Amino acid sequence: KNWSSYPFRLFLFNFKMKSTSTLVTIVAAAAAVVYSADAKKDKDVETVETVETVEVVEVVEVVKTEDVDAKLVTSPTYWPTYSPTVIEDDEPSTPKGFLGNELIDVPELGIRLDSSLTATQIAKAGQKVQLKDGNSNLRWHNWMDGASAIALPNGGHVYVSNSEADNGKGGVYGFYFDKKGQPYDYKQLLSGTTWNCSGGKTPWNTWLSCEEHSQGQCWEIDPDPSSEHHDTPQQTVLGGKDGGKYEAVAVQDSKDSDGPTFFVTEDRSNGALRRVETSCRGWNALKGGGCPSKTTYLRFLNNQRFEWTSDEALGRQSASKYYPNTEGITFHNGKLTFVSKAWHVIYSLEINTMTWARERTGRGKLIGEGSFLGQPDGVISGYNQRYMYFTEEDEKGNGMYARDEWGKYYTVFEAISGQFVGDETVGLSVSPDGKTMYAGYQEKGVLYAIKRNDDKEWERYR
């Protein structure tokens, strides 16, 4: 290739020798790197792509000393005061899984879909929902956004879906399925709220719906028609007394604790990720009053460590400097994972060791067709964590993508060229039996049910 057409820099390894009797000769190779235009523009994170494979020559003489320190010398990056470790990428030589195949055009849906999958449109904004015994009374809501498929006592499940409509026209809706997966009801569960963006499921199978405006709050809805709380949604303590532009909620639940811990993201340039520790369980856990809670805020430290501080101002300073505009969030097996939409970055926090790492989403790691170059938005992961799934916001067209446990990305579906321009993918969730994935497009208001052709589970969500 014409190497002169690519900006590049030389990566040098300096070796500090405590033993002067050992002579080492090493031949190093230069790697060409291309900086993404948006990273230059945002001054956030640089993207590195290998332009050409370079054959590395052998070391002339083996070093035999125990006192050798290697240091990587590079030019400064856009990151402010630290150099965190990227999430390790120790994948097998041949990636395994059902994704990464040819993308097949599905013109009637406006998408390109991985050939191992089948998609069906099951709802569209402004149209009545087709149920097993006829059509719904209500029309499918506008501006659908965050969602979750929650198990019901009758063996079925409900797909709860936010509406990000403005001026008190937002809320939450429930799309009900029986134990055979047949839809039988669709109704509104919360009304009178504004810009309900995303949220999260609680351990007791209620839905937390968060508003994304300057005084937004997070509301709890019980979608089970047989519950005593079904018709009485309540404001929770998650939003605090002043409220905020809240996005998504993740839950850390331990049987050894008095109550679960909730983590809430906020889509502001200084939106501090908040941690709310509760002291009881069930419907009253987030109500306040007789069930006290404690709120602290994420603060990044040097050396890839973090702390939870009670000083909200310090949390907001840290967010502004290190993790602005957070969106999707998930917790599993001691690890809290969330995304910064503005910086196209995934953060991974090890709760027990109080350490963290980060990774640029999608760049240079996509297996098969498609491109995950837009802003990461919603994120979910299953109990076995084989894959993590993302929705996307991008002016040129959007899709849904997966990241496997070795750091490789795959396209689940994406818009056909010219379709869904300026839209965003939303509503990502998987049915409790793991067989059906739900996702769609917000502005067009279409919802898809997506299944694997081999009839196996995507992931198991309880």
Image (cartoon, rainbow, N blue to C red):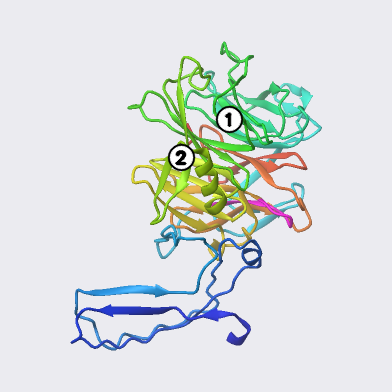
Q: Nearer the viewer, mark 1 or mark 2?
A: 1
- Residue tagged 2: 331
Mark 2, secondary structure of its residue: strand
Question: Could you say which disc has been placed on residue 38 in the image?
Answer: none
Mark 1, secondary structure of its residue: loop
Q: Residue furthest top?
A: 228
Q: Nearer the viewer, residue 196 or 206?
A: 196
Image quadrant where residue 362 sits: bottom right
Q: Nearer the viewer, residue 122 or 269?
A: 269
Return the x and y of residue 37 as percentages of the image width and height. Answer: 66, 68
- Disc 1 and disc 2: Cα gap in Å? 19 Å
Mark 1 or mark 2: name the one nearer the start of the chain.
Answer: 1
Return the x and y of residue 291 as percentages of the image width and height. Answer: 46, 18
> Do we see residue 380 in this rendering?
no
Return the x and y of residue 96 as percentages of the image width and height. Answer: 45, 57
Query: In the image, is 195 to the left or to the right of 59?
Result: right
- Residue tagged 1: 239
Return the x and y of residue 135 as percentages of the image width and height. Answer: 77, 24
For the record, the magenta segment spans 393-402
Query: In the image, is 130 to the left or to the right of 84?
Result: right
